[in-house]
Amino acid sequence: MAMESAASSPRAALPTPGASRKRRRSQSPPPAGEDPNEPALARPRFGDNLDLILSLQGKELSLERKIELAFNFVTTESNRSSHGHRADNIKLLRMVSFIGNWVQSILILPENSKRVSEPFDPVLDYRCWVILRFCIEKKPSVSISLNLLKPLGRVAKDGLSRVQIGASFDDCESSLLFERVLDCISFLFSSNTRAFFNAGVDLWTSCVIEAINLVQKVSPNEKSGCAVLQNLGNCLLEQFSSFLRFHANPKNLFRPFVDKILDPLLELLVLLNSQANSIEHKQAGTTLKIAEEILSNGLFHPQHLSGYFGLKNLNKAPIAKDVRGSYHRHLFERFKGIKAESKAVLLAGFGYLLQLFVSRARNQSTYIAPRGTSFRNPQKSSEASEEPQHHGESIFEVFMQFMEPLVSECKSYSQKDFSDLGGTKLVEVHCMLKSINEILRTVTEEKIYVPTEDTSEGSYLQFLQDIYRVLILIAEKLYDFWVSAVHLEDTNIKKMLPLMFVEIVVAVAHSICMLCNTVRTFRAVTGPDVVPRPFSVASLSSHKCLESLATLLSSQTLRDAICTSINSMPEGQSSRCIEELTVDLTDTLKWMNNCGEDVDLESQGEFLSISRKSVFYQKAELLGRHLSELYTSVLDSITVTSSNTALVAISVERLVNAIRPKLSQLVRNDSVSSSEFICSVIGNNLSKKQCAKWQKIPSLSWMFVFFFRIYTSCRSLYRQSVGLMPPDLAIEATELVGNSFTVCCGKEWTNASNVIAEGYFAWIVESPGSLLDVIETLSQSIPKNHSGFAMLVYVLHMMALQRLDDLNRQINAFDYLLEDNTQQFDTEDRGNTAVFKESCCLEAARLTNFMMNYVGILSSGENGHFQCFEISSSWDLSMCSLDEGSFHIATWRLLCENIDIWSLHASKKDLKSFFSNLMKFSFVQKRSCKDEENSGNQYSHREITLRTISVELLCDTIIYDRKVLLKNLASSFCHALKKSVSSFVTRADEDALLDISPDLMEILNKLNNMKLVGGTYPDEDGVDKYRICENLLNFLSTVPGFHSNSKSFLRLITHILHLERLLLLALLSRYELCNPIELIRLFICCRRAMQNLVSKFGKEYLESKQYSAFSKLIGNSDSLIWLLRSVQEIIHLSHKIFEEHTDEKKNTLFSLVDKTSEIFSTLANMNSKFCLLGPKKRIECSLEHSASESDTSEHDGQTFDTLENSALEYVKIMAEQLEKTTTGIPVTAKDRNCVIKLENCYDNVCWDTLLCTMSCIGGFLWGIVSAVESTIKDYPIASSEERKVMHQYASNFSRFIAKFETFIDICLHVLFMENKDCGSVDMISARLPQELDCENGFLNIDAVMDGWTMHQLKNNELQSDGPSSIPSESHNFGLFTIQCMKRSLLENLLNGEGPFVAFTLRELYTVSAAIVKLKVLLSFPRDVCRQECNPSQHMSLDPMVGTAYIALQKIADMSNWPDMFSLVWIDGILRYLEVLGTLPEHKLSKELYAQIVNAHVRAIGKCIVLQGKGASLPTHEIGTNTKTLNLRNTSDSVITKNIMDRQNRLNSLKSRLRLSMRKFVNVASNMHLSATLQVIERALVGVNQYSHSIYEVKTGTSNGGIVSSDVAAGIDCLYLLLESVPGNKHVLKRTVPGLVGALFNIVLHLQSPLIFYTEKLPSLYPDFHPDAGAIVLMCVEVITAFVGRHTFQIDACHVSQCLHLPVTLFKGFKHLAGRTVSHSSEKSGDQTVGQPLDTEEYIFDRQFSVDMYAACCKLLCTVLRHQQREVGRCVAVLEDSVNILLSCLESADPKMVRMAGHFSWNKEEALKCASFFRRIFEEMRQQREILGKHSIHFLAGYISMFSGQGPFQTGITREIDEALRPGVYSLIDICEESDFQQLHTYLGEGPCRTTLANLVNDYKLHFQYQGKI
């Protein structure tokens, strides 16, 4: 009011001086930080504002000046706000209100008045829009004039004019205007979304049209400034879309929208769709969505939808005139106007409207239905109360409304001559076809046409067929015009025709996919009186049309669609489908009859090139190549069941009857000739001369192919039907086919009438010719140099295999009848049976010989009549593409897949030829590009090669199950390997020596004398010999059960030893002239193959002859020395060949060492078993059961003694040879005789040689351990005598074991212990001198070795009769020697330095572990052995344990990723600790034990941190049900091979750590167990190991908390403890409440939505904390383990927390983002440089969500089962958790999920989760007494969710409901009748009550027990 009075009086605007002073005195002091001398502009006064108002109201100043004053005011106020100055809000708001109204008034001035009074246009002044934006910001409630839409339209028009004239936007004024306007309206629409909702349609129309024109112009423009203009247009259009959506009466907007806005919007829609997928037009997609929303809201508003469904009936029913004039019809009237106005672009845009309509209709709750269902019975809503209801109408009716105008237009064009249309009309036709394509594509994708929803008259199908006919007519017209347009000079028409033809082809393809009767679409009948069919082949008589049709029929997509349709067809329709196929086939044969009249016999018979271009040839090929494939695809896809078997059989009989008249002319027994068949095919009688010419026509082969393929498919389908028939019907059916023996009894098999009448073509004629006669006749008469012959031969192979299958059945039956113990027949019948069998075998042999002829052609490399073939060519498995080039692949595949059928009748020569080809194609052939593409491809459309087929056969077990095949495979493989080895031989005389044992002593002597200079080496011309040999050896290394006999086995071993010899000679002589890396890799393959062969040989107890041959070959000292010495030489050479410590070098050399060690282990194990009790007991047992054979059996007592002595001698030889390698420590000193100080020994050791020595010793000892363990396990020792035998055997090697033990101790002290200034001095250290002599490259340690070995043998002898000694005192080990370890050395090894040192340390621990294990196994009581063996006595246990402790601590303390190879050598340390943990009683002090356990815990924690989301408990790594999904990488995370390899090694290390700790825990005393629990409990609570006041369980941020690695390891080790320790131990039971409470504490700290996400890109550096989600999952599983143990008492509060845990974790789960999310991570301040940035991207881990869901379900089930009392008190909590878990299974509309970005499980994931949730309901049924009265509440929740009343109101899919039904029935089973009445009342009227009734009915039908079975 004060402002208004001031404005009314000019005087009042001028204050008096006194008043001014009073005001200044009354003013409060300036705010803090403000200068009192600040200029007046910064502190405006009320008088200044009044002056501004008067200036704006007055007429003295120009409009431009007024705008300047207002703009200055706005700028000043903005600056004051930015500096934090406060102003009088009331005065400011009044001022803002005035300025806002004023600026709007000048913006909406009529354009005419401005032109007269002011040349200046304020609308185009950016300052006006800045002023308006300021007013809206300061006062959001400022009144906005609806007329503001006019200036917005003028701004858009100005922008359009600037773009049209090509004006630049570089000047400041131009860019500022549109930027400020966009900023203003964006802020306006965001603050007041309904600002213009009350505007009239005319105002909106004028503005929107300008915006559409602007967007259409700037969308393809990439100039600067166009992006702002496009955003401006998008903003206006988006607001207009909201206006249409929320208008009070959308009906009033429909006509203006169609009349004024539809045309430009359709034009924009066409443009945007062409740009949507373009990279250059990035904003096109956003604009396209806005345009589609406008059309959806304007044309298909929810209030409009019901009217569209009733448009069809408006044309039929006698409805009132006003209703007939429904406004919906106006849209289609406008479409007619578009056609009349010849607006081609709009015509193309009309096709997008149906897609928008379907999308809008599906999103409405009134019409919710799954894809593939129609929209029926739309319910009347309040919004559409005025619309008539039309029940029974589907969405297909709406499609017809959209399609009918286009179809009628096409019909009109089909009757016109395209040559008279002109270029403009052709453009209209093109746009019309494009619109049709869009509509048909929508129908196909949205599955609008559903056959079950069709009318009784089939009107929907008829409409689709009408569309197809019209399109075919257009195609014919277009094709004729295209052919004639070649001579036209109009280039525009020539360019338009290909585009039109593309559209017509796509339209035809869409229509074909929609038609159910796809096969009959291609039927053709000619004649003047025939009604035109959907498509007439005869009408397309030109070559091009037939070629186009052939291309269409050869489409794999089309065939797949047909097969899918047939497979999904109800089984009752199968017979009808075959009937339709029969009619179609009959018509097709008639068509071929009529086509034979125009054949020029002269050209067909004499000129092959002309005949292939003839129409008859093309039609014959169309029939034989393409239609036969379609027909057989249909027949092969038919599903035969017991219910439809009779109908299917009858239909197949009718189909065979259709081909019988023609096929019978070919297969009659009296005259097997093709002459009469030719006459029947062409329908004319021919003379002999004409028949002779016809037989030379290549096209005749296609006719044979067609009939034979149909017949083979019919036989196969009929046999399926007979197999499911009742016996009486089956006998009748087989009599018709002539194969009655399959259902007849044994007596009838010998009846001559039943057997003689049987033949392959017995179904066609009564006395058919044999299949062999048909094959011979066709092979002689048919031309062979064309693709039809290749197809025919392939079909003949298929027929031969079918016949062989029948013959095999008969032969097996005859074999059964001819058995000696069968007395059912007399001598005469038995003789007939033998004759019949011989006849069948002869026919089978001849058929097999026919097929094997082509195998011989493959061996020669030429394909006979099919020219030469490429061995690397491929085939796509399609019969349509089978030709001369792919014939060999198809035939080879047929033979390989059916080897079990034909191999029984093949000759030795044929089998040899087959397996020779198998070796050639599998190993000799290179891996082609197609093989690379198809590797891992599971789809059926992959291309195969000869190599892939052969490899698949080698992977099939059928070869290894049949002795004949295995024998031939072994022989061929030996020959192939020998040939491959011979390629490395350079001297001709060496080829003959490859079959005998190699002389390894020769090369060993040369190695010792260094006389290998100038030796042989492989030549360079054999490029592929490395690959071939490597393939053979790799196969030999992996194939199971390869060797069939010892002869082949020994041959393979011999060839491998020869190859090793040749490879080593080549490397040692002149490796620089060959490929040394390939040679080393090949040498490793040899060693790997040898290890596999030796292992398989040792798994069986061989005969003495076989064992002697094996021992002679590889059982002598030369072979053992060769195994060890060759590896040493290879490793020495590797330093010159490989770069320094590369991953390739490590992988290669360490693999070689390991394989050699495994060979020693296998040899020691195999031979030790002969010396132990197992074999002897087995032989004695076998002799007792077969006393009659005891005299002749080879396994008698004497034979076994010979084997035992040989085996014992062989083991001794191994021990002696290995003992020789321990005479000294190898060094690299150049001087042969010198002295090396003890502290310098480490730097001079030759680690290569020492590594090989340690590895072979370890393999030998572990082989003996394995033999002893297996013997004790398989044959428990019962008597003391047998125990003495075991001990006596071990005593033979006591000296060697003591020597090995001493050597290990010395190496440990010399190489890894600090010998200076170390306080601890043990016996080894006391005996070591300060200097060691070096002789011939070895440190002389004989004195120490001999003294310490004798001391061991004297005090710890393994012999049973050794002298007694005083038992040693219990030795308690401490940590004093840990200080003497070389800590820096271990740190370097963990960092990847010195890999050979690291692996040597690994083998050192491995050997020590074997020695300890052997002593444990042989520690017998004193009644057996007078000297008890103490495993831990006199060993260097202190330094061994100390080194292990330091290594584990170093792993836990590493801040970055450890070197992956360090995880490998740590395995040796853990193996030692594992064996140490198996000792009967720990000799470790409590402190040391706790230290070791803590080191294990910390190392496990480090592994969990490195594993990230993949960390889990051992149950997941062993295997769980959820892992069957195998979905860990279904998201967009980047997983490389290196990452996978790293994770695998981490998993292996973690498993060994767990195993080692489990061994310690299993035998722990109460004192040690208490120490373990204390370590785990401190870790769970989060106590920091360095400071007890710091806890490592933190809440973190809103994204969840964090825990340390020790906390995670505590969870893992606690679970391990629960599995290993009995629950009745008091020391464990008393800690249960604290442990469970700590687990809940961890979950509550970590729970957040982020636990379901994982990093998109694995970081290069590990995080400091484990993954929160993985830790939560581990906690839930450990809590479940606690709850499930009866021996533990869980607190009641913990039970309630268990029941509430699913709510905590899954609340809001369905609202999680299913894609990438960003998260600001909080790293600690001391993070390593180079770690990930603060902002990281996370993706939803689908597999983890399934695992977490399953864990929660399992937790609830376990609580229900074991905690019944507490559950009864917390039913409400249980109900909340069940409802939360059930809501996660609610279905979601895929479109809504994509729009909102929410997560949704796929079908497989949801089914897996539903199976877990179902168990909760099933467990409730078991707790009937407690939960019976509450079951209706759980049932009500399920019914509500199923009925669409859940959070998303989408219900549950059918598949999920089927998975949950058993659980729901369990709930119903525990409900009383009163409960159903109560639930019935509670649910009320609606779908829930219906669901309840259906559930109860299904329960009674499928689940309820009725008292009988």
Image: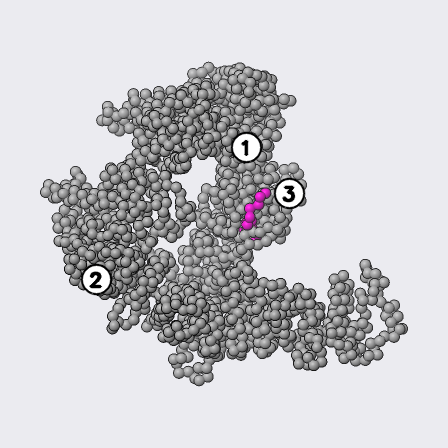
Amino acid marked by disc 3: Val
Amino acid marked by disc 2: Ile
The local secondary structure at tag 2 comes to: helix
Vertical placement of residue 6 versus 1131, above or below:
below
Q: Which residue is mark 1?
A: 1140
Residue drawn at (46%, 84%), measured in percent from left and top? 322
Q: CA distance from mark 3 to mark 2?
A: 85 Å
- Residue 1729 numbered mark, or none: 3
Q: Residue 969 location in percent, x, y?
A: 31, 37
Among numbered discs 3 and 2, the one appearing first in the sequence: 2
Residue 1658 inside the magenta-drawn segment: yes
For marks 3 and 2, give the one nearer the viewer: 2
Residue 1577 inside the magenta-drawn segment: no
Q: Which residue is mark 2?
A: 682
In which quadrant of the rendered image does the C terminus lie? bottom left
Among numbered discs 2 and 1, the one appearing first in the sequence: 2
Could you tell me if residue 1567 is visible in this image? no
In which quadrant of the rendered image does the N terminus lie? bottom right
For marks 2 and 1, give the one nearer the viewer: 2
Q: CA distance from mark 2 to mark 1?
A: 79 Å
Q: CA distance from mark 3 to mark 1?
A: 27 Å
Start-end of magenta stretch: 1649-1661
Front residue of this view, candidates 347 and 150? 347
Amino acid marked by disc 1: Glu
Front residue of this view, candidates 1874 and 95? 95
**Residue that sits furthest to the bottom in the current view:** 321
Q: Residue 1777 location in percent, x, y?
A: 52, 55
Could you tell me if residue 144 is visible in this image? yes
How was the colour assigned to the protein in this rendering?
A: one colour
Residue drawn at (86%, 68%), measured in percent from left and top? 24
Among numbered discs 3 and 1, the one appearing first in the sequence: 1
